Image (cartoon, rainbow, N blue to C red):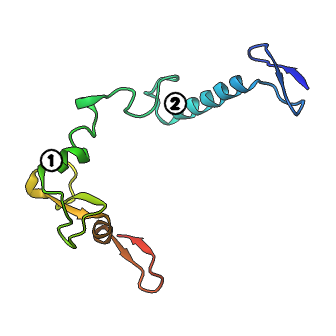
């Protein structure tokens, strides 16, 4: 059946007669609902402005710019895991666990498995990972 959108007055096809908005208006309304709920939690953010830091910070002003993995990989030897010697799925670990302390002496290369074992523990009965 053909209905008329209450927002933009265009005609659209709908399967149910209780539909009030065309597809494009419905999407815009959904976005507006999310923005209004975000405004309640964060009054300083204007409705219509993007969320997160991506809309405001780019390059060197972005919080992750100087602490990104690419910067760490250049500081230390990242050819193999310092614990098991694996050459796959390598990560950079902060020894003191402070992600802002980026001195090469505080960085070590570990594989994903060794890194996960360091940051988590397993339930001895089920074998499932538990938060530390």
Q: Which mark is residue 44?
A: none
Of 21 and 48, the residue lying toward us = 21
Residue 107: % across, % down: 15, 57
| Residue at the image point whose x is 57% and y is 34% from the top | 37
| Residue at the image point whose x is 20% and y is 40% from the top | 66
Helix, strand or loop status at disc 2:
helix
Helix, strand or loop status at disc 1:
helix
Q: CA distance from mark 2 to mark 1?
A: 40 Å
Residue 62: % across, % down: 28, 33
> Can you tell which quarter of the image residue 91 is in?
bottom left
Left or right? Give the position of 101 relative to 29: left
Residue 64: % across, % down: 28, 40
Local packing at callout 2 (Cα closer than 10 Å; few below 14, some 14-19, many 20+) is: some
- Furthest toward the left, the residue is 105
Left or right? Give the position of 95 relative to 40: left
> Can you tell which quarter of the image residue 92 is in?
bottom left
- Furthest toward the bottom, the residue is 125
- Label 1, on which residue? 74
| Residue at the image point whose x is 45% and y is 32% from the top | 51
Left or right? Give the position of 96 relative to 43: left
- Label 2, on which residue? 39
> Can you tell which quarter of the image residue 90 is in?
bottom left
Residue 54: % across, % down: 38, 31
Of 34 and 54, the residue lying toward us = 54
Q: How many marks?
A: 2
């Amino acid at each position: 059946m053909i209905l008329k959108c209450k927002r933009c007055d265009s005609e659209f096809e709908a399967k149910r007669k209780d539909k009030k908005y065309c597809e494009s208006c419905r999407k815009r309304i959904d976005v507006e609902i999310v923005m209004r709920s975000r405004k309640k939690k964060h009054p300083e953010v204007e409705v219509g402005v993007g969320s997160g830091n991506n809309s405001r910070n780019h390059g060197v002003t972005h919080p992750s710019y100087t602490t990104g993995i690419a910067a760490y990989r250049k500081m230390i030897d990242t050819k193999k895991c310092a614990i098991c010697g694996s050459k796959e799925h390598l990560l950079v670990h902060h020894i003191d666990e402070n992600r802002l302390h980026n001195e090469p002496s505080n960085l070590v290369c570990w594989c994903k498995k060794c890194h996960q074992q360091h940051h988590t523990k397993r339930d001895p009965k089920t074998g499932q990972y538990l938060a530390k």
